[in-house]
Image: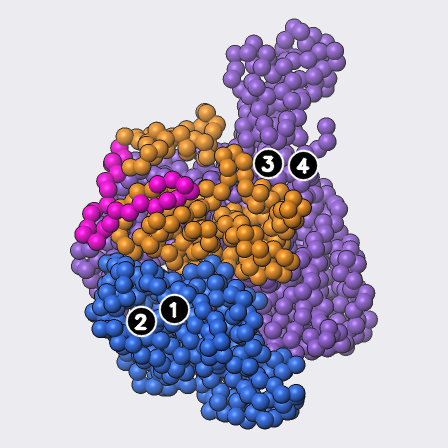
Chain colours: A blue, B orange, C purple
Amino acid sequence: MQSFGYLDPADADAAIAAAAAPGGKFIAGGTDLMQLMKDDVEAPTRIVDVEKLPYGAIEANGSGLRLGALARMSDVAAHPAVQRDYPVIAQALLASASPQLRNMATMGGNMLQRTRCHYFRDTGFPCNKRNPGSGCPAIHGENRLLAILGGSEHCIATHPSDLAVALVALDTSVELQGVGGARRTVALGDFHRLPGDTPQIETVLQPGELITALVVPPSAAARRSAYLKVRDRASFEFALVSAAVALEMQGNTIADARIAMGGVGTKPWRLPAVEAALRGQAATPENFTAAAGLAVEGAMPAGKNDFKVKLMQRTLVRALSTVAA
Amino acid sequence: MKPGLTRRGLIGRSVATAGGLAAVPLVTPAEAAIPAAPAPVRTPEMVDIVLQVNGRRLPLTIEPRVSLLDALREQAGLTGTKKGCDRGSCGACTVHVDGRRVNSCLTLAIRCQGRAVTTIEGLAEGDELHPVQAAFIRHDAFQCGYCTPGQIMAATALLDEGHAGSDAEIREYMAGNICRCGAYNHIVDAIRDVASQAAGKG
Amino acid sequence: MDAIVGQPLDRVDGRLKVTGGARYAAEFPVPGVVHAVLVQSSVAAGEIVAIDTSAAEGMPGVLAVITPENAEKLQADKGGEQVVSRPTLQDMQVLYNGQHVAIVVADTLDRAQAAASALKLTYKQDEAVTTMDSALNTAYRPKHFRGGARSPDSNRGDADAAFDAAAVKVDATYRTPIEHHNPMEPHATIARWDGDRVTVWTATQGISGAQHTLATLFGIPPANVRVICPYVGGGFGCKGSTWPPATLTAMAARKVGRPVKLSLTRRQMFTSNGYRPRTVQKVKLAADAGGKLVAIRHDGMSQMSMPSLGEFAEPVGLATEMLYSCPNVAVTHRLVGVNAPLPTYMRAPGEASGVFALESAMDELAVALRIDPVELRLRNYADGDEHEDKPFSLKNLRECYRQGAEAFGWSQRNPAPRSMRDGRVLIGWGMATSTYPANRRPAEALVRLQADGSVVAGSGTQDLGTGTYTVMTQVIADELGVSPRRVRFVLGDSTLPPAPGSGGSTTVASVSPAVQAACAAARQKLFSLILADPQAAGLTSADLRLANGVVLAPARRFPLSQVLARAGLEYIEGRGKTEGPPGGHSLHSFGAQFAEVRVDPDLGEIRVSRYVGAFDAGRILNAKTGRSQLIGGITYGIGMALLEETATDAETGRYVNADLAEYLVPVHPDVPLIRTIFVAGEDPVLDPLGARGIGELPMVGVAPAIANAVYHATGVRVRDLPIRIEDVLG
């Protein structure tokens, strides 16, 4: 790890100013940043600790769920309102990482978690995301874990977060605070960027811009939701494929559907075409299977991850069946 | 040099841990030839901090990049907390910070000022082992012992969190602690045993 | 007094381990110690043409940057079975990706790490062979198979002719991947020089081996090397040899004139101390219509490094030679060299990989014959070792099958694949045989009976978590009639009487007879002192019995304290020795493994849901630590079956998942309740206690039992480990 200076400002403006200057980097839970710094993937010269900032609250009421950016994964997962009204969020959180890591990691940090692509995390390899223009050996290499959707010729790294998949399904928005007190709100679905020609740019964040909260609107679908994660190991592993499904049912008819999947895309992968196909349809295995076929349209598997095309559809059908039942 | 880490203290320890047969030469000759231990070069980014570890004040001079794990092991002499992967993937470094279990390898020491850190060395009350420690011995919940401090710190937290409702729940909430010797069955036995004792008393 | 041996005594080092007090190699408080970090190559083949150390050397606290350009020249190694002498910065050649190319020393760990990252190396790259499968046509015969003790090939009868003529046949190729030991303690060494003497605290399975290797490399007498290792945080084979990092630590300590500590990072653990090599194994089985084997052919290829690094051949076919009764058996072993680190022993070397192939093939044969898998094995039961043409010293494998099957409920199995379900979930039951050689090597021990009745004893052996401290304490307690609480057994110090490395499940059979002999010698000395005493007139040693610090004789008692005081002694010392293995018998342990898997038919997730292992391993010295070894080995086998694989980037020969996040080993939820059975029996030949090591046996046969269960659940035969979702997705 390269040496850095450490600051822990008491107010957000000072923190943002310190992080906006070159070499600055926020730290919250630190679970991913510490790994990246230890592996020399990131080498900030100034670490700005945001832990003391007042963004840790979890608020749930009629106007929705507001998750402070500094709320810990374990606390959000254990929150009664989250468990009751947004089960997909609680389930995605409990399927993530380990109890220790969930005690440390925060909502905001989780949105900024970087890919687990082996080639990205080992500086002994070239990587367009880490070192733009150096090439992507992963596409023709060990790509079993990598994305089948949203990739480019420069990068097919999978977005690793479970939580972001659940949140993107529920139309979450991200509250941001920038230099000079500028505030804006971005839909989480627009927050992460596809790699395209610039895989090193992963989000729409401006220099120094800080996530302050994630806001989830209330919905009948959110109350009837679930997260299904498929993996080799029974626990403590990133998803091979995962599905966040939220359905509003009227009898056996799907009134509304919110669906996103993980482990398959270069960003948390919302599936609007599948949602549209299911709306107004009966909750039958045939309809689920037909809709799941739409999920993989445009998929570009790379060889060792070919199985994800089939697994993605099966996972979606299973999640739909579970939630509709 | 920290108290207790005198040369004499070291010799005493190596006798106690590594040898003990008087006729066998257990002290390497020419101890005097070892250069004194100079302090690390002081650089401007180094800071003086005080940690609270196991109820004791622990003053340290560190660079901001030093992890809590390395501060404990390399500077404070508290080597009970183990380094298995240094990336949060194995749980050997688990400690409690303000009562919550965390991976000390991914925690900067500088961020722990003003917080209560508990390590495996702080779990027993004097000679009396914590019930989880005693249960680990009783159930032989380890072999090599290297993951054990982390398993025990995770297990005590799990019990406090109320996640010992079933074997499946214990396993899931212990998933962050790898045991390569494969003592998982016995670790679950030990935790279940402590949980049921506590329930019996409760 | 009831025997202490055999009782489920709590581990005597338990308290130290649960309180954080047990000190592992990196944890000794050596004053003035500074930190070393290794730098490793990022190319697989070629030569270093330039090393820019300027940035690193200018960083605060950096004490030395050691590269092949300025490294101390080591003595050429004279060789030896376990010695790994390269690469130790002796030349600029690069033979694999991740090879040590420099070592950086600084006053703090973080500074050493940062400086190591600042080193800039330039390479002239050569074309590398990066994967075994691309080079199978270059396979060659091992030159020193089993240390030169035997040929890599064996033949009994005419396997090919019998195969061609047979009624029922299986002919399949099985593959096992590169696997890494990944003990929880990364290898670590602290080295301190005092003139031309060096003390090393190092994580090793063999302190004597480390002592001799370092002495040879640094050109000093073995007596000048002291190796200390009271605790090892798991080894599984990767701490069996003295690998370059230990040597480089000593080199660095000499260079900077201060004690140096080096702990490998987890990533470096993948390229620094061996691994289980990839194997490609062709197995042919043939049987008559009654299920009697008429031919077995097992052609094993295992992946090797470039030959100049040494040689390690995974002995996959050894179990095949003796496990079943069959008149025609042929076995070959071949190596395929690639630009990779040198492979090594990993828990149950040979058997873990080889028995996967053999026992998968036996399951395929059972399916082809429509015979129950247990029944097929009974029909081909070997009453003697047909390869060695010797009787087994002890073989209770029939009982393992019987008791294991009964505990598992095997008789309820519907043999048809996909026939057993729980709702939608497919249930599969599979079984396999386990075997591992029993062995014994020369060892020595020292015992002191002290005036207060307590005993101090020692041997230069190791405790990898296997329970050496505890079982030796039990042996001494019985021999000298003393409570285990009054026994202190020390190990892990090369100043103690020598013992073999702890590998190949040899420690119990090697060290315990030496300890017993030392106890007997001490007791005999004590009795001689007493018999020389006028008060003992008329007694012979047959009249004397030692218990709790008192020698009892008819109508007389001789407290140890008085005997010693009269003789002017502080203690009575006895020394004992074990010789090498006894001849005349084939020495093997056996077992029967039974697994139940649950497979999601849609999602392909495979989980082991039930497990029974029944083992014939001679007398069990401690039922508690013994069971721990069994569940540990089975858990390791679950990883081998379903999770573990080190993936290599074919372009660069670099391992891609060299960490514990993506090299998957079992975690708590992967391991169900495991039922273990020790089938009663004492080995009358191997050692006086009738015991055998059990470190490796329980791992053998787990992977095929699970693979066979997966076949039973899904109808899909997976011959390539690990078995994963995509294999059974349909």
Secondary-structure class at tag 4: loop
The CA distance from mark 4 to mark 3 is 9 Å
Which residue in the protein does label 3 denote?
C472
Circle 4: residue type: Val
Examine the structure image and report whether residue C88 is included in the region drawn in magenta.
no
Relative vertical location of residue C197 with respect to residue B151 in this rendering, above or below: above
Q: Nearer the viewer, mark 4 or mark 1?
A: 1
**Mark 1 element type:** loop
Residues at circles 4 and 1 in contact by the CB criterion of under 8 Å = no
Kindly identify which residue carries mark 4.
C5
Q: Work out whether disc 2 and disc 1 sit on a shared chain.
A: yes
The residue carrying mark 1 is A69
- Whether discs 3 and 2 lie on one chain: the answer is no
| 10 Å crowding of disc 1: few (<14), some (14-19), many (20+) | many
Which segment did they paint magenta? B33-57
Give how far apart the Cα atoms at labels 2 and 4 are.
64 Å
Residue contact at pointers 3 and 2, CB within 8 angstroms: no
- Dot 2 and dot 1 residues touching (CB under 8 Å): yes
- At x 54%, y 28%, the residue is C456
> Where on the picture, by quarter, is residue C291?
bottom right
The residue tagged with tag 3: helix, strand or loop?
helix
The answer to whether C168 is drawn above or below residue B149 in the figure is below
- Within 10 Å of disc 4 (Cα), the crowding (few <14, some 14-19, many 20+) is many
Kindly identify which chain the residue marked by label 3 belongs to. Answer: C
